[in-house]
């Protein structure tokens, strides 16, 4: 597709399709959890994304200092921790509820860095949304639900760390180039821990192909679409579209996984979406 054709596509469309691809990838990943540990599926997602982006950006052509390499390695570990915790959570929680709670990460960063009443209102609404989901939206007595909530809170914390570190290193060079190195480091450094559980991928071409599909849908394609969108979107448009992501995940969960939200989940989703809309004025991004 030529640059002229791409320019005719509204930037908002790229971000909407970005969200759809991300959560379609998550829905496909859920189907793999019966055959492979969620954390190992996350490792394959990062590995596939790393291979694609490293081949595209070829970061070895750029001069790196040891300090930059160390920062990229730490960034990669945050990415792996964020994705592994998220996958462990959606193995136990409905997709829409998990995504909504995970947005506590960027909301907390916005509150910490923000000034005035807006961040405080965002924090209050996000907290109310989490209470609605965890207190009324899901049955805490069901097996795995409480562990799932702990996992998604870990994912939110990792997302917050990802944002803070990412903003510190993104100014050094292309964000895509940094990401390619970080994904490579993340996959490499966690290989001794997560590779053994992921070796079952080679027992079936269908399973290996599914893992490649998850990597494409969840990492390679969404990041490319977001890169196309971000340079053309205003802060207001980005905030609005980011706030729609919890709703998008709930729709994908309902259609793909037959996870029909409860009234408590829906109320929590709405509250967290409003909190995200308020907090996203600072353009906090995610991979």
Image (spheres, grey):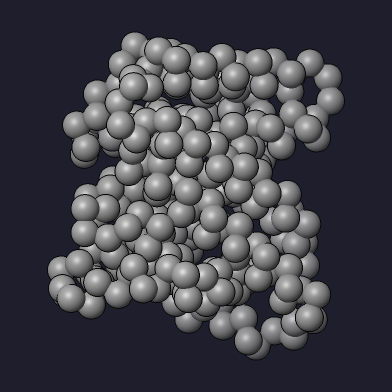
Question: Extreme bottom residue here?
Answer: 61
Residue at x-position 78% and y-position 32%: 112
Answer with left or right where residue 155 lies relative to residue 170.
Answer: left
Residue at x-position 23% and y-position 77%: 202
Rendered location of residue 109, percent (x, y): 71, 37
In the image, residue 211 above or below residue 100: below
**Could you tell me if residue 213 is visible in this image?**
no
Q: Quadrant of the N terminus?
A: bottom left
**Could you tell me if residue 147 is visible in this image?**
yes
Rendered location of residue 110, percent (x, y): 72, 33
Question: Extreme right residue here?
Answer: 115
> Which picture quadrant has residue 116?
top right
Rendered location of residue 171, percent (x, y): 77, 61
Residue at x-position 64% and y-position 37%: 106
- Foreground residue among 120 and 202: 202
In the image, residue 141 above or below residue 103: above
- Foreground residue among 47 and 282: 47
In the image, residue 70 above or below residue 6: below
In the image, residue 96 above or below residue 57: above
Answer with left or right where residue 104 lies relative to residue 173.
Answer: left
- Foreground residue among 114 and 191: 191
Residue at x-position 73% and y-position 49%: 164
Rendered location of residue 267, percent (x, y): 43, 13
**Total tally of numbered discs in the picture:** 0
Answer with left or right where residue 244 lies relative to residue 78.
Answer: left
């Amino acid at each position: 597709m030529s640059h002229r054709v791409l320019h005719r596509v509204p930037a908002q469309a790229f971000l909407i399709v970005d969200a759809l691809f991300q959560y379609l990838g998550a829905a496909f990943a859920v189907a793999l959890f019966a055959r492979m540990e969620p954390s190992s599926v996350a490792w394959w997602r990062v590995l596939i994304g790393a291979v694609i982006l490293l081949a595209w950006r070829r970061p070895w052509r750029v001069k790196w200092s040891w300090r930059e390499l160390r920062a990229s390695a730490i960034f990669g570990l945050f990415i792996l921790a964020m994705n592994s915790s998220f996958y462990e959570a959606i193995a136990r929680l409905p997709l829409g509820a998990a995504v909504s709670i995970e947005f506590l990460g960027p909301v907390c960063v916005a509150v910490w860095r923000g000034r005035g009443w807006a961040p405080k209102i965002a924090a209050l609404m996000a907290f109310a949304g989490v209470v609605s989901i965890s207190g009324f939206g899901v049955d805490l007595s069901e097996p795995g639900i409480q562990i799932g909530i702990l996992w998604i809170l870990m994912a939110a914390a990792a997302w917050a760390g990802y944002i803070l570190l990412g903003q510190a290193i993104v100014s050094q060079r292309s964000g895509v180039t940094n990401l390619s190195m970080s994904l490579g480091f993340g996959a490499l450094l966690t290989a001794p821990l997560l590779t053994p559980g992921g070796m079952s991928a080679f027992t079936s071409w269908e399973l290996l192909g599914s893992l490649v599909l998850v990597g494409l849908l969840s990492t390679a394609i969404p990041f490319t679409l977001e890169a196309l969108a971000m340079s053309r979107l205003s802060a207001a448009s980005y905030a609005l579209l980011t706030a729609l992501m919890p709703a998008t995940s709930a729709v994908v969960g309902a259609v793909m996984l037959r996870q029909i939200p409860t009234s408590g989940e829906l109320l929590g989703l709405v509250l967290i979406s409003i909190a995200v809309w308020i907090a996203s004025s600072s353009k906090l991004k995610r991979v």
